[in-house]
Amino acid sequence: MGSAPYPAGEWKGKGRGSLQELGCMPWKISKQKGGGGGGGGGEVAVEEKRCKDPRESQQQDLSSSSSSLTPQAPPQSCLTPPAIYHEKQRRELCALHALNNVFQDGTAFSRDTLQEIYQRLSPSTLVTPHKKSMLGNGNYDVNVIMAALQTRGFEAVWWDKRRDVGSIELSNVTGFILNVPSNLRWGPLRLPLKRQHWIGVREVGGVYYNLDSKLRSPQPIGSPDELRKFLHQQLRGKNCELLLVVSEEVEAHQTWRSDS
């Protein structure tokens, strides 16, 4: 679970104002032998200035004027892909990774922050409904996630799977956190066991991405319609839950619902 945050050409015009544009060629240095007067045969440098024929200048002017009438193709800019923050799996800190991936900020939350929230929610119990996080190794439950979001002015809205995801007002939702079954691994081995796993989903640069910390890189989901299909498919699975990450204001006015 480490972090891996996931070019445009420049057009340069050529300068003008050269000697050619003034109708004259550059100065040419020629050498002529000096004669007479007991000069001893030395060479004298003579500067010559060659000017263009006026007819050549007129032809050049006509050529440049005709080229100026030709429409110029607009410069082609290279589209730079958006930088996507993707925190990868480390220990059992998938809740931490899901939060940071949704906020696209590796400093939004830390393991110490979540552990402090966990201790505050269950200060004197060893066996709690907040999973086994006594050593701060992760595996935090929804209570810790909800409390963590509140420290940043956000709320987690539990989505009733009986409702159609088409009624979610996507423009008012910051991101999504899914709780899904996931296979356990022991190194490269995939064990025939499953346990719940948190994954983050959000929009970056107009495209929705699956930011599951177990993926090697962010997985594009696509447009809003494709996101709804993705969520619908996930919620059809067994033991899958969905949280909408929204601001306190959105939650207060219930504007995460398109039918509100």
Image: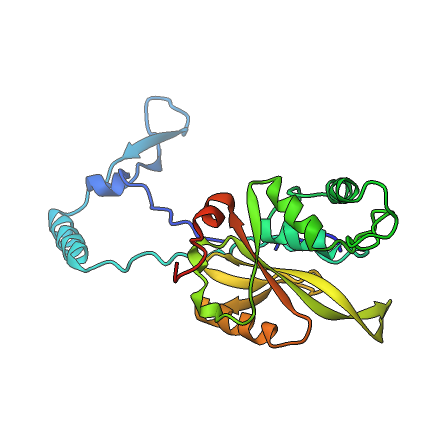
Percent position of residue 121, x then y: 75, 43
Percent position of residue 159, x then y: 56, 63
Q: Is residue 75 rendered to the left or right of residue 72?
A: right
One can see residue 3 in this view: no
Viewer-nearest residue: 135 or 200: 135
Quarter where residue 25 is shown: top left
Is 221 drawn above or below residue 61 in the view shown? below
Viewer-nearest residue: 79 or 84: 84
Q: Is residue 161 rendered to the left or right of residue 70?
A: right
Is 158 drawn above or below residue 43 in the view shown? below
Quarter where residue 23 is shown: top left
Quarter where residue 36 is shown: top left
One can see residue 204 in this view: yes
Percent position of residue 162, x then y: 54, 72
| Residue ID at (79%, 44%) | 122
| Residue ID at (61%, 62%) | 218
| Residue ID at (63%, 66%) | 241
The quadrant of the rendering that contains the C terminus is bottom left
Viewer-nearest residue: 11 or 51: 11
| Residue ID at (76%, 56%) | 1
Is 2 drawn above or below residue 114 in the view shown? below
Percent position of residue 177, x then y: 61, 59
